[in-house]
Image (cartoon, rainbow, N blue to C red):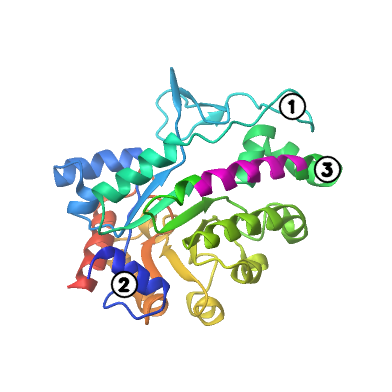
Amino acid sequence: MTPREAVIRAIDRKAPPYVPWQVDVTAGVDAALRAHFGRDDYLYACVGNHLVREKNKNHVELGNGAHRDIFGVVWQKQPGAAGDIGDIAAYQLRTPQMGGYTLPAPQAGLPAEKCERMAREHPDRFRIFELSATLFERAWSLRGMEDLLADFILSPAFVSRLLGAITDYAVEVIRIACRYDIDAIMFGDDYGQQHGLLMGPAHWRAFLKPMLARLFEEVKHHGKYVVLHSCGDLRDIMGDLVDMGLDVYNTFQPEIYDMAAFRRAYGDHLTIYGGVSTQGVLAWGTAAQVREETLRAMDILGTGGGYIAAPTHQFPYGTPLPNILSFIETVQQNRA
């Protein structure tokens, strides 16, 4: 059975012979693992990743740690910073109006190149094209998070117009990407904090749910799976996401959710992707504790399918190498 087949069986609840797994890394950890394994393709050749992900991303490097994204947002990394993203240098929309700002047209060549490369280089893995910063994140990257949250209350017409324009863009990207041999579209949009939603469930349902539902419907129309990455506590809207047709939920944070209760409530509807805490055991535990927690997640979440074992996020810079290797060894032994 190929890794792709194992993931599809997990999503379709057809009891794969083992729990599929995935490791995603930040730049600092990537460098450490390249040195450890002694090869650049270690994520597939050594770790055995089951997913391959490409993003709708084409940053222009501006020098001195700055880069500009597709929407014209300039991100600035501080000198010596270990992070992968940086901070926004200046927001495009300083007031709650579009002004002279125009959203970009989808770049047809970008999904084409990346989707074709995934199919060519990883035909046996589950292939995902990702629209990171899909709706809420894209809106606040243009407007500023505090201002956008205030706009939900003070300037609702502007919020609807902005999110509608972003959704139109995303729909066109989906249509382009789904022409190619991929398995899923992944949306990246952080709605949660450690306790509840950043904007609250009422505003999420009023402004974001209709737009996200439109994107889910477009993906389903093309016969692909829907994957959502959203950090934090989404319990207030998990039922909405299930009803909208979400197939795979990332990231499942055990410091927020009770594994057994979540599995009982949503395990027949969602495949869980995550489950081993990057802010908990992976950062602060021992290698033995990582192994124990990984086995517990696979046992509770993975029986009969519906689970992709993974850290709750990319391994962040500073994660102890023995803990990373313990996770990898544990999931690999599950397959043996």
Q: Is residue 172 above or below residue 238?
A: above
Tally of numbered discs: 3
Where residue 293 appears, as percent x and y from the top left, is: 35, 69
Q: What kind of residue is marked 2?
A: Val
Q: Which residues are magenta?
A: 161-175
Dot 2: within a 10 Å radius of its alpha carbon, few (fewer than 14), some, or many (20 or more) residues? Answer: many
What residue would you read off at disc 2? 19
SS class, disc 3: helix
SS class, disc 1: loop
Seen at 66% across and 66% down, the residue is 237
User: Outermost residue toward the right?
Assistant: 154
Pick whichever of labels 2 and 3 is earlier in the sequence. Answer: 2
Q: Horizontal placement of 133 versus 31: left or right?
A: right
**Which one is in front in this view, the residue at disc 3 or the one at disc 1?**
3
**Which one is in front in this view, the residue at disc 2 or the one at disc 3?**
3
> Cα distance, mark 3 to mark 1?
16 Å
> Which quadrant is home to the C terminus?
bottom left
Overall secondary structure of the magenta section: helix
Seen at 50% across and 67% down, the residue is 247
Residue 301 appears anywhere in the view: yes
Q: Is residue 74 above or below residue 9?
A: above
Which sits in the foreground, 233 or 111? Answer: 111
Q: What kind of residue is marked 3?
A: Ala
Residue 100 figure quarter: top right
SS class, disc 2: loop
> Cα distance, mark 2 to mark 1?
47 Å
Residue 133 appears anywhere in the view: no
* Residue 157 image label: 3
Q: Horizontal placement of 16 versus 241: left or right?
A: left
What residue would you read off at disc 1? 94
Q: Horizontal placement of 209 versus 118: left or right?
A: right
